[in-house]
């Protein structure tokens, strides 16, 4: 575990989080402001995007497995083997892109506007938008594999900077397009153009900085492609399960409750997605080191990484999730200018979901970064499919809240299962324990119980009062969490390690 490498990734994670916040500050409010009936128009854009986003699961599957395996082989000194994995992955992605380009034409004969109950976009425009989004997803597979290839040599932060630059151009182009009231096909074309520009740049940068990582199709083989299909497919199942959770509800709500409720659900969810990104950073930045330590079979150091990162995540979850909940009245006022009312019960439910997801994603990182994910993938995919099917009925009875309660129940069950898989990952002489986790469960239940009253009452308070209570409560949570999860002890450990490694540690 190298602190300098983790800190470099932390910087890129903060940059990525900043871009996410920028996107949410610009794009949704611009839709609401510049389009007539902006709430419904934005809901239809979300529904169109959600209808094809599941194709991106193929990217997650191939790219995640290939980059993890490349890194493991590079760490062990098997450079030809690593290049064979990379080249075979590119062969597979070329095949996928060809299928997308030809198979995607089917959208021009499907009744898209009828299927999604679209009112503000015509049939041809809807079909063209979907086709351009499909091409964007296909090209993004190549771009992601290129930028994540830097992980093999311990320089993932460089690839992340390139990805962030692409996202920044994407956000600005989308904001300008929405401000100009561009058609949906034009917005999709702008997104595709940013990917074309930065895919070319990523190839150029690899050639001049890490030539050994420049992909060559000749190094691969179709036999290797066949061998990577199963593990890549299991990663794809994990991503497809994410689609069922994040995009599936949008489509169901669009059909059952209409675009206005899609917008309400999406905007409330966005607030906690932004806060959840802070929690994800503590998990994502250690992914590169997890893969390298697994490649070295250094289980004692991996156990140390697990313990240190767990303390940070357990400390951050209540502070970030509950802090975001209490700040919701101010966030909605500044962000949406009171176009959408504050719904306290919906926000409380989403805050609890955010807390559970923060915990689960930390534990899942150890399975996915070590390529020990196959047992997990099938179960969560089936579970999410069942969850979504059940939520159709609960939404008809309780509306959007019905889906969130169903979602929460499944996330709790899934988190317990992932913790079980973490135990199986480590050998007996480096076994993890759950003492801090048990302490966290008691802490988070008490924290939500104590803060539920101000969260509900804030709907009737003035903004200065609700904001003051939010800040004070968050600070108290931070102090209590600092003591509960022994963060002072962690600070001493990290400082001593940093001072010991600083003179000799390489990037």
Image (cartoon, rainbow, N blue to C red):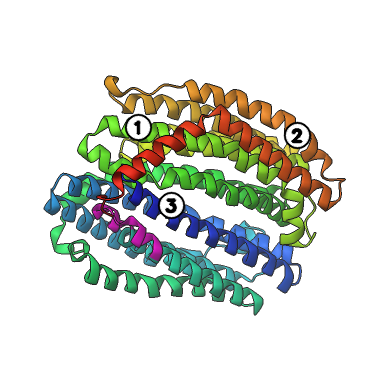
Q: Nearer the viewer, mark 3 or mark 2?
A: 3
Q: Is residue 505 visible?
A: yes
The residue tagged 1 is: 304
Q: Residue at x 52, y 71 (%)?
A: 188
* Magenta highlight on residue 160: yes
Find residue 324 and report its horizontal and vertical position in percent: 66, 46
Q: What's the mark number on residue 450? A: none
Residue 36 quadrant: bottom right
Q: CA distance from mark 3 to mark 2?
A: 32 Å
Position of residue 78 relative to residue 336, above or below, is above
**Which corner quadrant of the image does residue 205 belong to?**
bottom left
Nearer to me, 197 or 444: 444
Sequence-first tag of 3 and 1: 3
Which residue lies under the disc numbered 2? 452
Residue 303 drawn above or below residue 77: above
For the N terminus, the image quarter is: top left
Residue for badge 3: 10
Q: Quadrant of residue 303?
A: top left
Mark 1 surroundings within 10 Å by alpha-carbon count, few (fewer than 14), some (14 through 19), many (20 or more): some
* Whole-percent x, y for residue 34 in the image: 71, 74
Tell me which secondary structure the magenta stretch mostly adopts: helix
| Real-space Cα separation, disc 3 to disc 1, in angstroms | 18 Å
Helix, strand or loop status at disc 1: helix
Range covered by the magenta-colored residues: 148-161
Residue at 80% x, 59% y: name it.
338
């Amino acid at each position: 575990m190298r602190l300098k490498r983790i800190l470099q990734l932390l910087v890129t994670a903060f940059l990525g989080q900043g871009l996410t916040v920028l996107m949410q500050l610009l794009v949704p409010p611009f839709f609401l402001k510049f389009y007539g009936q902006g709430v419904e128009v934005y809901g239809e854009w979300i529904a169109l995007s959600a209808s094809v986003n599941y194709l991106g699961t193929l990217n997650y599957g191939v790219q995640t497995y290939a980059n993890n395996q490349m890194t493991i082989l590079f760490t062990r000194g098997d450079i030809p083997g690593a290049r064979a994995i990379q080249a075979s992955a590119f062969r597979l992605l070329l095949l996928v892109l060809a299928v997308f380009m030809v198979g995607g034409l089917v959208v021009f004969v499907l009744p898209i506007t009828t299927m999604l109950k679209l009112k503000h976009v015509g049939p041809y425009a809807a079909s063209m938008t979907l086709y351009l989004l499909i091409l964007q997803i296909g090209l993004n597979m190549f771009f992601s594999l290129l930028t994540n290839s830097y992980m093999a040599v311990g320089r993932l932060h460089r690839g992340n900077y390139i990805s962030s630059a692409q996202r920044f151009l994407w956000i600005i182009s989308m904001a300008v397009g929405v401000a100009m009231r561009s058609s949906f096909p034009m917005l999709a074309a702008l997104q595709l153009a940013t990917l074309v520009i930065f895919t070319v740049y990523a190839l150029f940068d690899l050639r001049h900085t890490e030539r050994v990582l420049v992909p060559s199709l000749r190094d691969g083989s179709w036999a290797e492609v066949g061998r990577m299909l199963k593990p890549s497919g299991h990663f794809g199942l994990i991503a497809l399960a994410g689609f069922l959770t994040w995009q599936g509800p949008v489509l169901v709500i669009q059909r059952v409750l209409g675009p206005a409720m899609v917008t309400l659900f999406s905007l409330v969810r966005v607030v906690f997605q932004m806060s959840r990104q802070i929690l994800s950073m503590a998990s994502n930045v250690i992914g590169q080191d997890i893969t390298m330590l697994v490649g070295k079979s250094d289980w004692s150091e991996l156990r140390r990484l697990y313990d240190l990162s767990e303390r940070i995540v357990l400390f951050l979850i209540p502070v970030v999730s509950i802090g975001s909940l209490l700040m919701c009245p101010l966030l909605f006022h500044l962000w949406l200018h009171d176009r959408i009312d504050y719904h306290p019960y919906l926000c409380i439910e989403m805050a609890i979901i955010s807390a559970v997801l923060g915990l689960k994603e930390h534990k899942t990182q150890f399975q996915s970064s070590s390529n020990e994910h196959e047992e997990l993938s099938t179960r969560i995919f089936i579970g999410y499919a069942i969850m979504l099917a059940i939520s159709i009925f609960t939404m008809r009875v309780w509306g959007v809240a019905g889906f969130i309660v169903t979602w929460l129940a499944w996330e709790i069950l899934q988190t317990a299962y992932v913790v079980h898989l973490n135990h199986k990952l480590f050998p007996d002489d480096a076994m993890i324990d759950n003492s801090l986790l048990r302490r966290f469960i008691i802490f988070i239940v008490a924290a939500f119980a104590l803060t539920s009253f101000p969260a509900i009452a804030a709907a009737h308070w003035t903004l200065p009062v609700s904001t003051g209570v939010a800040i004070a409560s968050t600070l108290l949570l931070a102090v209590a969490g600092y003591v509960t999860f022994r963060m002072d002890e962690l600070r001493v450990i990290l400082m001593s390690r940093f001072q010991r490694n600083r003179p000799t540690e390489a990037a």
